[in-house]
Image: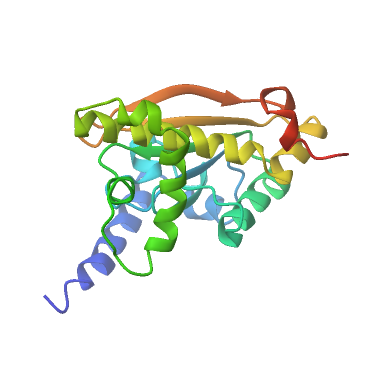
Amino acid sequence: MKRSYLKLLKNNKAWVAEQNRNDPNFFKELAQGQNPEYLWIGCSDSRVPANQITGTKSGEVFVHRNIANMVVHSDMNMLSVLSYAVEVLKVKHIIVCGHYGCGGVLAAMGNKQFGLIDNWLRHIKDVYRLHYKELDALADKELRARRFVEVNVIQQVYDLAKTSIVQNAWRKKQPLHVHGWVYDVKDGLIKDLKVSFTGMKDLHAIYHFEK
């Protein structure tokens, strides 16, 4: 059990061998740099690997993950990833992808203390407060949790549009679209929530930064 991590190194060697068999130039080309079209902001849950569930290859998706796929305005980690992806890599699409059965969302629905993570869960609770009328109207707890996952993603998409990073890209006429998706661990399918921001016109004027 203590040495179970060694299988990861063994798997790595097997993966490298397979890649070289399929494409001898794979690593040579990969080492030249990255030019991803997508930024993925997803949950840290181990069951939701961005590349695997979207069928994308190494170098195609720039990824940031945290508990419950949150876009927190004071999170310098997320903002740094966002800045690099938008301003340097010039990604064309930002995808916020939540997932049903998210532990962070479920924890935020209750009142139990978990420790340090309570400070992070508070941001998720804020989303519940904004949508409590719709959520409290759902008597079935599972349905309420699923809908909470969805509205949380929608809120994070909105919060992305509030950032100066995204707004400045739009002002520069940079093609940038923000989307909200939810992954279902039970069947492996992704649901497009049909919430999309493509410019300042989609955002309330109170959040517009001056030029």
- Using the rendered image of the protein, determine whether residue 69 is visible from the camera's viewpoint: no
Q: How is the image coloured?
A: rainbow
- Position of residue 4 relative to residue 143, above or below, is below
Looking at the image, is 72 positioned above or below residue 157?
A: below
Q: Determine the image quadrant of residue 188.
A: top left
- The number of numbered discs placed on residues in the rendered structure image is 0
Q: Nearer the viewer, residue 130 or 186?
A: 130
Query: Residue 190 appears in which quarter of the rendering?
Result: top left
Residue 16: percent from the left, percent from the top?
A: 35, 57
Residue at left 28%, top 54%? 111
On screen, residue 62 above or below 116: above
Looking at the picture, how far across and down is residue 179, in whole percent?
53, 30
| Residue drawn at point x = 48 percent, y = 54 percent | 27
Whether residue 201 sits left or right of residue 64 in the image: it is right
Q: Can you give x and y, in whole percent of width and height, for residue 205 in the image? A: 75, 29
Most foreground residue, 15 or 186? 186
